[in-house]
């Protein structure tokens, strides 16, 4: 995979991680009153989605860096 393409994919997955974290982990604090169980589910899904997206970003970067 060419370096430019690797950078684009890496940035995409990094931005996706930010979106997951914003929507899931930060968003519930700015919405109306929500049940604690529902809020914790949003936070956990946000953190999990961010983690998975960042792992994809790192994977793409590592695979792209090994090839000429």
Image (cartoon, grey):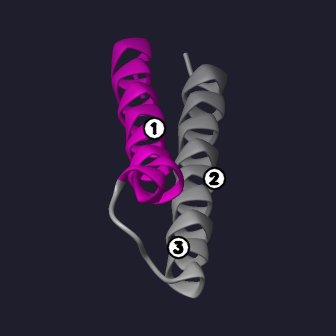
How far apart are the two marked residues, 2 and 3, measured between alpha carbons? 18 Å
Total of numbered circles in the picture? 3
Task: Say which of 31 and 22 sits in front.
Answer: 31
> Start and end of the magenta stretch?
1-30
Crowd rating for badge 2 (residues with CA inside 10 Å; few <14, some 14–19, many 20+): some
Q: Which residue position holds label 1?
A: 18
State the residue position of label 3: 39
Residue shown at 45% from the left, 38% from the top: 18
> Looking at the image, is mark 2 or mark 3 nearer the viewer?
3
Please state the horizontal and vertical placement of residue 31, each as a whole percent of the image: 34, 58
* Residue 16 percent coordinates (x, y): 39, 43
Magenta-drawn stretch contains 21: yes
Q: Is residue 46 above or below residue 67?
A: below
Magenta region, main secondary structure: helix
Q: Residues within 10 Å of mark 3 (few under 14, many from 20)?
A: some
In primary-sequence order, the first of circles 3 and 1 is 1
Residue at disc 1, secondary structure: helix
Which of the 4 image quarters holds residue 7?
A: top left
Residue 39: percent from left, percent from top: 53, 73
Residue 63 screen position, x and y as percent = 60, 35
Q: Earlier in the sequence, mark 1 or mark 2?
A: 1
Q: Quadrant of the C terminus?
A: top right
Label 1 to label 2, Cα distance in Å? 10 Å
Gap between marks 3 and 1, in whole Å? Answer: 18 Å
């Amino acid at each position: 995979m060419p370096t430019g393409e690797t950078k684009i994919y890496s940035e995409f997955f990094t931005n996706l991680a930010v979106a997951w974290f914003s929507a899931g982990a930060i968003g519930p604090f700015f919405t109306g009153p929500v049940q604690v169980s529902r809020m914790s589910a949003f936070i956990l899904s946000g953190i999990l989605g961010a983690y998975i997206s960042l792992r994809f970003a790192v994977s793409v970067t590592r695979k792209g860096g090994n090839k000429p």
